[in-house]
Image (cartoon, grey):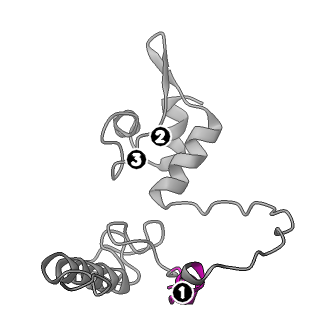
Amino acid sequence: MTIQEVAEREGVSVRQAQRYCRAPGFLGHVLKAAKVGKAFHIEESDYRQWRIDCGWEQAKPVAVAAPPVPQVPQPEEAAALLRPVRPAPAYPPYPLPADPVNGVLTNAPHERSSNHPHPLACEDYMRQEAENLLEKYRGSPNDDEE
């Protein structure tokens, strides 16, 4: 596909589509393109993967083979299995807009914003940053005190 086709599909100018192919691309995601003569050529698979990386499309589910026979975990592995696992959120991660396609322009985080992140994504990000700072300055709760 060509830059013009990408621009039509994304609803942007040709110049903006060209910017997607250069560093830093869109939010750091560069659209892979090969320059053929004076034009760019983009593979359909690279375009789809770029849209998934940018958060505009969901990845298609992949058929999974039968799971292997489980092995008995060792004691240290068993402790790792007991740690709580956070479920994946139903909204895009922090820097991405909450609803880039159907959202409305807002001046603050909102669940239907096309330019600001989801408020819960902001809370998750701030919580994680606070945990990182506490771990950095106080040490991990798993660290052995001397």
Residue at the limit of the structure toward the left, as seen here: 137
The tag on residue 79 is 1
Give the secondary structure at mark 1: helix
Q: Callout 1, which amino acid?
A: Ala
Residue visible at 17% across and 75% down in the picture: 136
Q: Which span is picked out in magenta?
A: 77-88
The residue lying at 81 percent from left, 62 percent from top is: 63
Residue picked out by circle 2: 7
Among the 4 quarters of the image, the one containing residue 14: top left
Q: Nearer the viewer, mark 3 or mark 1?
A: 1
Of circles 2 and 1, the one toward us is 1
Secondary structure category for the residue under label 3: loop
* Image quadrant containing the C terminus: bottom left
Q: Which amino acid does label 2 sit on?
A: Ala
Expressed as whole percent of the image width and height from the top left, the position of residue 122 reads: 30, 81
How far apart are the alpha carbons under marks 2 and 3? 16 Å
Position above or below: 76 against 102 = below
Disc 3: which residue: 29
Q: Residue at x 49, y 54 (%)?
A: 53
**Mark 2 or 1, nearer chain start:** 2
Other-residue count near label 3 (Cα within 10 Å), few / some / many at <14 / 14–19 / ≥20 = some
Quadrant housing residue 132: bottom left
Q: In this view, does 39 lie to the left or right of 46?
A: left
Q: How many labels does the image show?
A: 3
